[in-house]
Image (cartoon, rainbow, N blue to C red):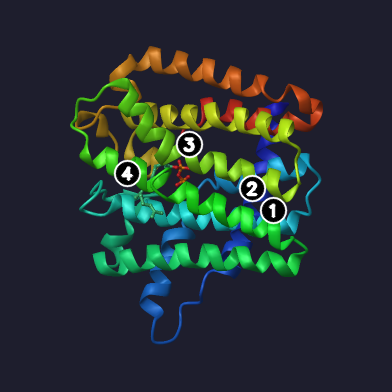
Amino acid sequence: MARRRLGTYLHAKRALLERELDRILPPMEGRTEKVQSAMRYGVLNGGKRLRPILTLAVAEIFGVDERQALVSGCAIELVHCASLILDDLPSMDDAQLRRGRKACHREFDESTAILASFGLLNRAFQVLQELKGKGVSQKAIRELTLLLTAAIGTDGLIGGQIIDLESEKSMDYATLEFIHSHKTIALFLASAEFGCVLGRAGGRDRAAILQYAKPLGLAFQIQDDLLDALSTPEKIGKDVNRDVEKTTFVSFCGIEGARQLNRELIQSSIASLAPFGKRGAILEDIGRFSLSRRS
Ligand code: GRG
């Protein structure tokens, strides 16, 4: 029942998000067509859209107008896609495949991929300003902007990535946790907090949502590591077996240890939803989905 409910929910929300992302991205035309095509290539390529779905689902709990949540979630997704393009570059992860297709720098070239990533970041912040015309207060827009800049900065994606790049294959657990709390969890937290800001959630509700999103983000990363170790490029649409070169949660805890840790994280995540009763049902389903996802 829960699986079917989430399946229907994800299907409907993804369709809305794809349409909105298509609207937000620049068209493939004019003298700058190449970089605009690379921006579209880096986004409209079958991502799961889990981060903006988190924004939508949290926003629903607080009765937010869906158009506001859609635009805000798309800003998050643009940042996520920009980070994937950069992460795949030869000077970073040197990945070949992303979402089942050639990585952006392989489909285009490295300089175009870098510019496309910056184009997406820029568009993300521009899009947040569109919220003004959708009834969101200036104060809330400022708060969303600050949250997003923090999630990208040295306390977020950039901080996690630099420590990841600097680290040797063998690292201690604290470093592994630091990397992923910045590279993965930061954007999960921002996605969930976006819904709270739009819904003017009170302090206690906001704390509960963040307590839900934090272990969810970590569990999502651990599942990513499990898929990297156990799946194939055909199934997950990206390169696998990175743990041969890197420390991952799987190389640290083993397959069963990582699965167990994941189950515990999702249990704690779901427990944080108690104050919302039935209103938290979709977030609960998303938690369970993150344990069973196969891509
Ligand atoms: C300046 C934006 C910016 C970033 C600079 C490159 C970088 C710093 C950070 C990399 C962050 C990164 C790519 C983390 C990986 C997180 C992760 C688990 C990605 C996979 O997410 P999914 O499975 O992917 O949700 P889809 O394709 O479904 O969207």
Disc 3 residue: CB within 8 Å of ligand 1: no
- Whether residue 46 is visible: no
User: Which of the two discs, 3 and 4, labels the residue nearer the N terminus?
Assistant: 4
Q: Are marks 1 and 2 in contact (CB under 8 Å)?
A: yes
Q: Position of residue 271 (x, y in %)?
A: 66, 19
Which residue matches tag 2? 194
Q: How crowded is mark 2: few (under 14 residues within 10 Å), some or many (20 or more)?
A: many
Quadrant of image for the C terminus: top left
Give residue 69's mark: 1
Q: Where is residue 212 in the image (x, y as percent from the top left)?
A: 62, 28
Q: In this view, does 80 lie above or below 160?
A: below
- Is 55 or 14 nearer to us in this picture? 55
User: Which of the two discs, 3 and 1, labels the residue nearer the N terminus?
Assistant: 1
- Assign a secondary structure to mark 4: helix
Q: Residues within 10 Å of mark 1 (few under 14, many from 20)?
A: many
Disc 4 residue: CB within 8 Å of ligand 1: yes
Which residue matches tag 4? 161
Q: In this view, does 249 lie above or below 90?
A: above
- Assign a secondary structure to mark 3: helix
Quadrant of image for the N terminus: top right
Q: Do the residues labelled 3 and 4 touch (CB within 8 Å)?
A: no
**Residue 163 falls in image quadrant:** top left
Judge left or right: residue 5 versus residue 48: right
Q: Are marks 4 and 1 in contact (CB under 8 Å)?
A: no
Q: Is residue 167 above or below residue 112?
A: above
- Residue drawn at (47%, 67%), measured in percent from left and top? 122
Kindly report the distance in space between the C-alpha atoms of the residues bearing marks 3 and 2. Answer: 14 Å
**Residue 274 falls in image quadrant:** top right
- The amino acid beneath tag 2 is Phe
Kindly report the distance in space between the C-alpha atoms of the residues bearing marks 3 and 1. Answer: 20 Å
- Assign a secondary structure to mark 1: helix
- The amino acid beneath tag 3 is Ile
